[in-house]
Image: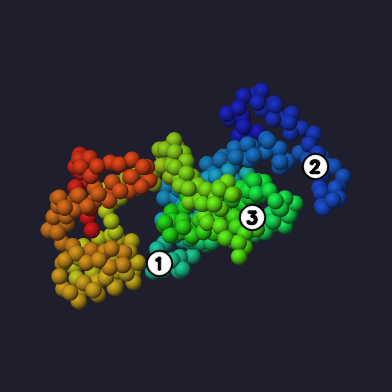
Amino acid sequence: MRVLRSFLDEDAIRMIQVLLAKTDLTVRLGTTSSRSFPTNVGTPQGDSLSPLLFVIYLEAALRELRGLYDKSITEVIYADDVDFVSTDKSALLRLLEIAPDKLGEWFLIMNTDKTDVVDVSRSDTQTMEKWRLSKKLSSLLGDREDIMRRKLLAAVALKSVMKDWLRYCPGNPSLRSRIYNAFVKPVLLYNSSTWGISDTELKNLDSFHRKQLRVLNGLHWPKKINNSSLYKLSNSVPVSQDIIDGRWRLFGHVLRMDPSSPAYQAMEEYNTLDSFMKGKIIALYDLNMSYIKISKETGVPYSTVVNFIKKYNKTGSYDRQHGSGRLSILNNVQINHLRTSEENSSLTASELSNEIEKFSGTRVSSRTIIRNLNKNGIFARIA
């Protein structure tokens, strides 16, 4: 009660004590229930008071824990799920050693067996990036991996629905669609608004969705139906439209978030000068610079750097060269030229205009975009 008394009045404290007084618990195993027994430690799970008190005591425990590590560690908290994020891996490992005992003082158990240490870093290929298979809030961190998992789960959900529900309504497409939208589609599109996927992957999702709609309505070869008729029969739309709608809703939530939140800061950081630059730059002033150093400074995979510079060494010039990852080897004169190049500014403005029209349906002229770029000191795309 010491923590609660620090910010609650006596009436609220007394009400909590009354709600927790004379609490009995019963253990149920299968269909058998034990005799009731009284308890005076903790709060029963399942009632409305339990999650509120848990969050309060978790925050109190974390405040004490924060005094044991420096500001290089950032906390990301969702309900009872806490992530500690840092660029210093040794600091996280030290925290992992001291956190269980400190949280134990507040009767909070930290299961070290279920605690994952995830190293988010860039590798030569995506298959080598193990962090993509890490799960967070029931979603994998890798978008492609999460989509594959969503498809598998949706297929299992559809099979279960076909077995348990849809066999009782064989001739009612409307009811079938409602059941599918209630039990299967949410499984397929869970957290889809956070995916950063290409048009090709969106088309593959639409294809998978149409395949499920055909199975849903019993449409197998030799029966044929075109896509528009299938959507009309199922009273549905392509899932790519649902994903885009979800993105806009998520964007609205981010805009209304606290400016100090990670999502809001990521949005602000995206809208910088770097967001107008396509690809990465390798400014090669020292021909003996380490490939590994170039890879770390630019964020470009090591193998891509090696292949690109080999191509540069073969030609022996500072002309703009494009390889995998759209890299460019430039000197200072060329960088300054690109910044003030009217032709390059027009190209950037034209690309931005097309992107704006694609996602918002509103056409903004290239001249208007160039005027705004000049106003903010941004003249051209570099590389």
Disc count in the image?
Answer: 3
Q: Is residue 152 left or right of residue 26?
A: left
The N terminus: image quadrant: top right
x and y percentages locating residue 288 in the rendered image: 21, 72
Residue 217: mark: 3
**Secondary structure of the residue carrying numbered label 1:** loop
Q: Is residue 370 among what the camera can see?
A: yes
Instruction: Count neighbours of disc 1 (C-alpha within 10 A) and say few if under 14, some if 14 to 19, many if 20 or more.
Output: some
Coloration of the structure image: rainbow
* Residue at 59% over, 37% down: 56
Instruction: Count neighbours of disc 3 (C-alpha within 10 A) and say few if under 14, some if 14 to 19, many if 20 or more.
Output: some
For marks 2 and 1, the one nearer the N-term is 2
Give the vertical position of 337 relative to 251 (above or below).
below
> In the depicted view, which residue is nearer to us: 217 or 369?
217
x and y percentages locating residue 324 in the rendered image: 31, 67
**Secondary structure of the residue carrying numbered label 2:** strand
What type is the residue that disc 3 sits on? Asn
**Which residue was labeled with disc 1?**
123
* Residue at 87% over, 45% down: 35
| Circles 2 and 3 in contact, beta carbons < 8 Å | no
The C terminus: image quadrant: bottom left
Badge nearest the viewer, 2 or 1: 1
> In the depicted view, which residue is nearer to us: 206 or 132?
206
Answer with the quarter of the image where residue 363 lies.
top left
> In the depicted view, which residue is nearer to us: 82 or 9?
82
What type is the residue that disc 2 sits on? Leu
**Which residue was labeled with disc 2?**
25
Badge nearest the viewer, 1 or 3: 3
* Residue at 28% over, 41% down: 364
Answer with the quarter of the image where residue 61 lies.
top right
> In the depicted view, which residue is nearer to us: 57 or 289?
289
